[in-house]
Image (cartoon, rainbow, N blue to C red):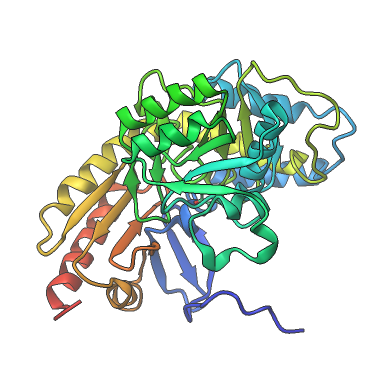
Amino acid sequence: MKLFDVYPLYDIEPVKGYGAYVYDGAGNRYLDLYGGHAVISIGHAHPTYVEAISRQVSLLGFYSNSVQNKLQQELADRLGEQSGLHDHQLFLINSGAEANENALKLASFHNNRSAVLALKKGFHGRTSAAVRATDNPRIQAAINQGIEVTYLELEDLDAIRNHLLSKKYTAFIVEAIQGIGGIHVADPSALLQVREWCRETDTLFISDEIQCGYGRSGMFFAYQAIPDLEPDLVTVAKGMGNGFPIGGLLIHPRFKAWHGMLGTTFGGSHLACAAGIAVLEVIEKEKLVEKTAQLGQYLMERLTEVPGLVEIRGRGLMVGIELDGPVAALRKRLLFEKHIFTGSSSDPNVIRLLPPLNIQKVQLNEFLQAFTEIMQSTPAL
Ligand SMILES: Cc1ncc(COP(=O)(O)O)c(C=O)c1O
C-alpha cells in the first residue's frame, strides 16, 4: 500500500532526538528550531516524560471514558493551577482541530446560532467547522462550505462590531498570536473591545491557544498578556503532549455540561494523561514559562543585529522573521548546510521559529551564527 501523498517531504529522516536536537540514522545532528511544528515543548525524549509514559503503558494505556480515571482529574488540576484558570472545566480530545471543533459545537449548543466570526490569515485546523473557520479556501471542500463563516481583519473594528450586533454569530475565534498566518501578535485593545461586544451579544469568545499557548509566548496562555481578557473557551493541543496526541478545551464555569453533550473514544486516555501530566510537571519544575520569556527576548534582540531583515515579530519562543523575498531557499540552506530546522508560514517571506521551550542559549547562538552566515552568503532572495 502506498501512502496518500499529501505532504512535500524533505529527504531527511530523524530517528531519535534529545532536547533541542534530532539525529538521523547516520548520526547527523540537527538543531530543531521548528519543534516539529510547535509540538515539542519540553524537548525531545525528556527523561521525566519517557519515564511517565513507559510506566503508564506498562500499567494501563487505555480504557474508555465510561469508567473512573483519576489521571484526567490530576491533569485538570495541574492545568488549572499552572494556567491560573482554576475554575474552568476541561474536556479532553486528541488534536487541535478537535479542540476547536468541540469549542464551536459547545458555543452553538449554548446560543443556538450557527455562523462563525473568524480573522483573516487565521488557522484553526482541518476538520469541518475548524477548517471552515480557517482563512484558506484551498483546504476547504464543498462539504465544509455549509457552515457560514465571515473572515475580517482585527483592525476593521467597525465591521466586527456590525457583524456581532447582528447576533447571528455563535462564536468569535482568534489566535492571540497567529502562527501559520506568519506570526502576528493581535492588538490588545482591539481584542478587549471585541471581547466586550461578544459579551453584549452573547457571542462566545474562543481563544485558540493551540500554537501560541502552553508557555510558548512566555506566559502560560498568550492571551494572558492582555489583562482582563477572559475568553469563554480556550483550546489547546500541540505542546500539551510534547508529541503525544492530546488536546483540550478549557470551558468557563458558567457553561454547564450534560451527559452526552460532547464525547470521544480516545480523548483523555490513561497514556495521554500521563504524557500531559509529565509535560506540566517539567514546565513547572524547570520554570519553562519564565525561561521562554527571557530566551525569546534574547533571541529577538540578537536578531535585530542580523542585517537585511524586514521585521522580527512575536513573543517568547514564537518568532517570525520577515525578509524582503521568499524564504524557502534560505530555509533549505539552513537545513542542508547548517543542519537547522525552521518553520515556514502561509506568508512566503516569513520564517517561523518554534523551538522546544527548554532550548539552551548556546543553541540559540548556534542558530544566530548560522542564520547570519546564510543571510550574508545568499545573493538575492
Ligand atoms: C492555531 C492552530 N489551531 C489549530 C491547529 C490544528 O491543530 P491539529 O493539527 O492538532 O489538528 C493548528 C495546527 O497547526 C494551529 O496552529
Q: Residue at x 64, y 16 (%)?
A: 254
Q: Residue placed at 48% from the left, 29% from the top?
A: 284
Answer left or right for 192 relative to 232. left
Q: Check the picture and name the quadrant holding the N terminus.
A: bottom right
User: x and y percent of residue 277 in the render?
Assistant: 62, 34
Q: Quadrant of residue 235?
A: top right
Q: Is residue 103 left or right of residue 35?
A: right
Residue 324 image offset from top left, x and y in percent: 18, 67
Residue 336, percent from left and from top? 35, 78
Q: Nearer the viewer, residue 229 or 155?
A: 155
The answer to which of 363 and 104 lies nearer the viewer is 104
Describe residue 222's horizontal placement relative to residue 149 as left or right: left
Residue 15 found in image quarter: bottom right
Residue 245 in sight: no
Task: Give how far across and how far down residue 58 sits, in percent.
Answer: 79, 46
301 or 255, nearer to the observer: 255
- Tell me what residue is drawn at x 20 percent, y 73 percent: 374
Image quarter hosting the C terminus: bottom left
Number of numbered discs on residues: 0
Residue at image position (66%, 58%) is 144
Which quadrant of the structure image shows residue 219? top left
Relative to 183, residue 297 above or below? above
Residue 174 position (above or below residue 253): below
